[in-house]
Image (cartoon, grey):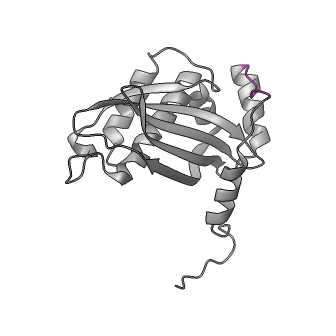
C-alpha cells in the first residue's frame, strides 16, 4: 500500500511510453526517494522487492498484457523470489530497473530484474510468478494462448529456465496451500 500513488502514476505513464513485446526488456528509470530509504540513507533491502513490482507493471502495461490480464480478471502473484546485492543506491540517486522474462516452466513465468546505475548492476533478483483468478491458478497454457491471440506473440523458442533456478525454488519451497505447513523450529 505504501507505493499505491507511485504505482498509479506509473500505470498512467507507462501507457505513454514506447510499446514493447512481452519478451523484450523493460527499462524503468527511477530515483531513490525518501520513502525508499532506511536509516543508512540507502534503499531499504525490503523496498527492492516493492520497486521490482513497478518494473514488472511497466513491462506488462507497455506490452499490452496488463489489459489482457485485466479483461480476464487475472492477478499476478509471486511464487518465489530472491535478490542479491552488490552496491547500495543512495537517496536521490537515479537508477533503472531492467525487467525481462527469462523463461517459462510447467507452472511459472520466470523474470530477472536488475537495478542498474551508471551501467553497472547494483542488485539482481529472480522470481517465479503465476496468475490467479477466482478459480485459482491460471494454467500457463492459457496465458501463452492469451498472449498469442490477443498480442500476436509467442515465447521465443530458446526460452529455458536455468537449472539452478529450478533447484533453488525446490530447495526453498513451502508445501502447497492445500497441504499442512506446521510451524516448528
Q: Is residue 55 left or right of residue 46?
A: right
At 58% across and 45% down in the image, what residue appears? 75
Task: Indicate the quadrant where residue 178 lies.
Answer: bottom right
Residue 121 in view (yes/no): yes
- Residue 144 sits above or below residue 15 on the image: below
Quick check: is 155 in the magenta stretch?
yes
Estimate the x, y position of residue 35 in percent, counting from the top left: 24, 44
At 63% across and 30% down in the image, what residue appears? 68
Q: Is residue 155 left or right of residue 85?
A: right
Q: Is residue 66 left or right of residue 40?
A: right
- Residue 40 sits above or below residue 100 on the image: below
Estimate the x, y position of residue 15 in percent, counting from the top left: 47, 20
Which residues make up the magenta segment?
Answer: 152-157
Numbered-mark total: 0
Q: Nearer the viewer, residue 136 or 116?
A: 116
- Residue 124 sits above or below residue 145 on the image: below
Estimate the x, y position of residue 52 in percent, counting from the top left: 45, 41
Q: Nearer the viewer, residue 81 or 74?
A: 81
Q: Is residue 144 left or right of residue 18?
A: right
Q: Nearer the viewer, residue 181 or 173?
A: 173
Q: Main secondary structure of the magenta part?
A: loop
At 51% across and 26% down in the image, what residue appears? 26
Residue 135 in view (yes/no): no
- Residue 154 sits above or below residue 46 on the image: above
At 53% across and 22% down in the image, what residue appears? 62
Residue lying farthest to the bottom in this orientation:
184
Quick check: is 168 in the magenta stretch?
no
Estimate the x, y position of residue 19 in percent, counting from the top left: 54, 16
Task: Indicate the quadrant where residue 177 lies.
Answer: bottom right
Amino acid at each position: 500500500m505504501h507505493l499505491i500513488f507511485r504505482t498509479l502514476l506509473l500505470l498512467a505513464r507507462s501507457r505513454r511510453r514506447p510499446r514493447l513485446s512481452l519478451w523484450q526488456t523493460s527499462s524503468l528509470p527511477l530515483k531513490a526517494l525518501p520513502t525508499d530509504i532506511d536509516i543508512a540513507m540507502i534503499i531499504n533491502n525490503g523496498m527492492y522487492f516493492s520497486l521490482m513490482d513497478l518494473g514488472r507493471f511497466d513491462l506488462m502495461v507497455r506490452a499490452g498484457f496488463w489489459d489482457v490480464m485485466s479483461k480476464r480478471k487475472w492477478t499476478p502473484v509471486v511464487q518465489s523470489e530472491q535478490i542479491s546485492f552488490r552496491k547500495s543506491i543512495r537517496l536521490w540517486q537515479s537508477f533503472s530497473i531492467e525487467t525481462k522474462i527469462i523463461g517459462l516452466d510447467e507452472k511459472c513465468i520466470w523474470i530477472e530484474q536488475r537495478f542498474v546505475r551508471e551501467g553497472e548492476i547494483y542488485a539482481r533478483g529472480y522470481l517465479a510468478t503465476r496468475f490467479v483468478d477466482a478459480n485459482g491458478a491460471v494454467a500457463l497454457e492459457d496465458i501463452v494462448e492469451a498472449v498469442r491471440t490477443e498480442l500476436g506473440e509467442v515465447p521465443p523458442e530458446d526460452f529455458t529456465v536455468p537449472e539452478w533456478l529450478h533447484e533453488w525454488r525446490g530447495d526453498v519451497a513451502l508445501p502447497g496451500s492445500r497441504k499442512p505447513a506446521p510451524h516448528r523450529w
